Image: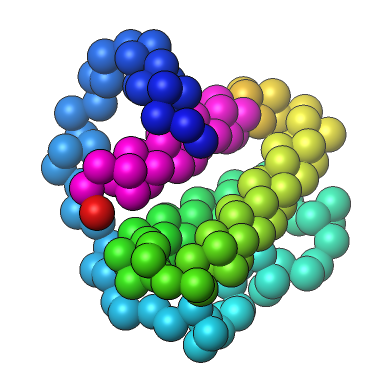
Amino acid sequence: MEFQECFSLLASRPAHAHEHCEEEKHAEDKPQDVNAVEHEETVVSEELEDLTLLSTRELVRTFHGLQETRVQIYADFRQGFQVHQKTEQFPAFCSGITERFSAVSERINQVEKYLRDKKQQVIADFIRKIQLEEKEKLLLVGCMATVMMLFCY
């Protein structure tokens, strides 16, 4: 992403009124080697059962677990960005992070679909809103990473 694109994206954002975001603590970062990244059993890989067999409550729990996985991916990205940004491993690291985000997002989209199939429109609509916010957040994180690489290092 070019600097001007990043700047335009940031400039177009409305004021953020989520005070609770300032109070939240980030997950503790742990060192990570891109070659040693264990494809630990995340909620994405654990949930091999057919989502169509899950109750509404179980689908919501699945969504919650996937959101927790997403938080961990952000923590891994934060740590890995600092470790790998000036190394040859950086593109592979970014590809791995992208694949993990994509898998989580796809699984959440499936959960949303099955909630709609179960006539749980309100819950599915909330999940859709969260997905859109997560998409924007990911764009902003990518933008900030680009700016940091251009100007801070």
Magenta stretch? 126-152
Q: Is residue 41 left or right of residue 51?
A: left
Find the residue positioned furthest to the bottom: 36
Relative to 47, say whether 146 is above or below. Answer: above
How many numbered circles are shown? 0
- Residue at x-position 83% and y-position 34%: 117
Q: Position of residue 106 (x, y in %)?
A: 72, 48
Q: Position of residue 5 (x, y in %)?
A: 46, 23
Q: Position of residue 56 (x, y in %)?
A: 68, 45
Find residue 137 and report its image quarter.
top left
Relative to 17, say whether 141 is above or below. Answer: below
Residue 97 appearing in the image: no
Q: Is residue 43 left or right of residue 153?
A: right
Q: Is residue 7 left or right of residue 111?
A: left
Q: Is residue 149 magenta?
A: yes
> Please, which colouring scheme is shown?
rainbow
Relative to 42, say whether 108 is above or below. Answer: above
Residue 87 appearing in the image: yes
- Residue at x-position 26% and y-position 14%: 15
Name the one closer to the observer, 132 or 11: 11
- Residue at x-position 49% and y-position 66%: 90
Q: Quadrant of the C terminus?
A: bottom left
Q: Is residue 4 magenta?
A: no
Relative to 13, say whether 6 is above or below. Answer: below
Main SS, magenta residues: helix
Q: Position of residue 12 (x, y in %)?
A: 39, 12
Find the residue positioned furthest to the left: 23
- Residue at x-position 40% and y-position 29%: 3
